[in-house]
Amino acid sequence: MREKVVLITAGGSGIGAGIARLLSEKGYKIAILSSSGKGEALAKELGGIGITGSNLNISDLERFVDTTRTAYGRIDSVINSAGHGPKGKLLELSDDDWFFGMNVYFMNVVRMCRLVTPALVAAGGGAIVNISSFAAFEPDPNFPTSCAFRSSLASFTKLYSDEYASKNIRMNNILPGFIDSLPEKDHFKKRIPLGRYGTVQEVAATAAFLLSEGATYITGQNIRVDGGITRSV
């Protein structure tokens, strides 16, 4: 089977790094963008391409996509992971806070899609997975900018998946709950019906499935990996 090429943004640590490791084990050619330099080191370990840069910077994204396509000749899939945006009391967040949150949680995906969609079309199709949040549909005051712009991401995902389905390009979101890439807090843990934080490996396994042949009829969806913390049905 031909090796597939996957781009992973914010892939130097946490969920992004966990996805990179699992996909490498499954035979993907890996390209990682990370602002910390950790992604470049991980990519070297995995025999892939690592770029140190920010997914908030259009020139870094262009360099990431162009370098990968030049090296591998194609792009088959994308994992859009992200850092953390501003937190605070709702009306105490400044305009700059809100604009930064929009860039962190929403525009990073929009910009990547503009750049990578022609490569996916040229490859005959592909899949994009965005790492979102359990709070996208049940807003949590602890994460105001994340809630607001990841709800927007859900709408964008449906619009994109509808428009590009005819090109065999799929897009889905993963909505993690509290995951062990961050320190546990008892007051959050008590909210989780399964009684524990999720693991990076559990999120990575979901991402790998959504890129796989087993998920070729799944698009435009928001998949909760949250231990049951959200209540809506």
Image: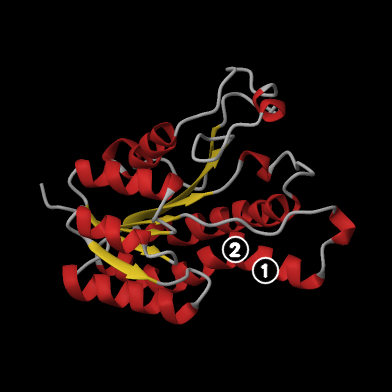
User: What is the image's colouring?
Assistant: secondary structure
Q: Residue 21 falls in which quadrant of the image?
A: top left
Q: Are marks 1 and 2 in contact (CB under 8 Å)?
A: yes
Q: Which residue is located at x 47 percent, y 70 percent?
A: 54
Residue that numbered label 1 is attached to: 100
Q: How much space separates mark 1 and mark 2, taking CA atoms?
A: 6 Å
> Going by the image, does 42 lie left or right of 17?
left
Question: Which residue is situated farthest in the left direction here?
Answer: 1
**Residue 81 vs residue 231: left or right?**
left
User: Residue at left 33%, top 40%?
Assistant: 208
Q: Position of residue 188 (x, y in %)?
A: 68, 30
Tag 1: amino acid: Phe
Residue at x 75%, y 72% (from the top left corner): 96
Identify the residue under disc 2.
Answer: 104
Say which quadrant the C terminus sits in. top right
Characterize the local packing of mark 2: few (<14), some (14-19) or many (20 or more) Cα atoms within 10 angstroms.
many
- Residue 41, position in %: x, y? 28, 60
Amino acid at pointer 2: Val
Q: Quadrant of residue 91?
A: bottom right
User: At numbered mark 1, what does the secondary structure look like: helix, strand or loop?
Assistant: helix
- 153 on left or right of 62: right
Q: Position of residue 108 (x, y in %)?
A: 53, 66
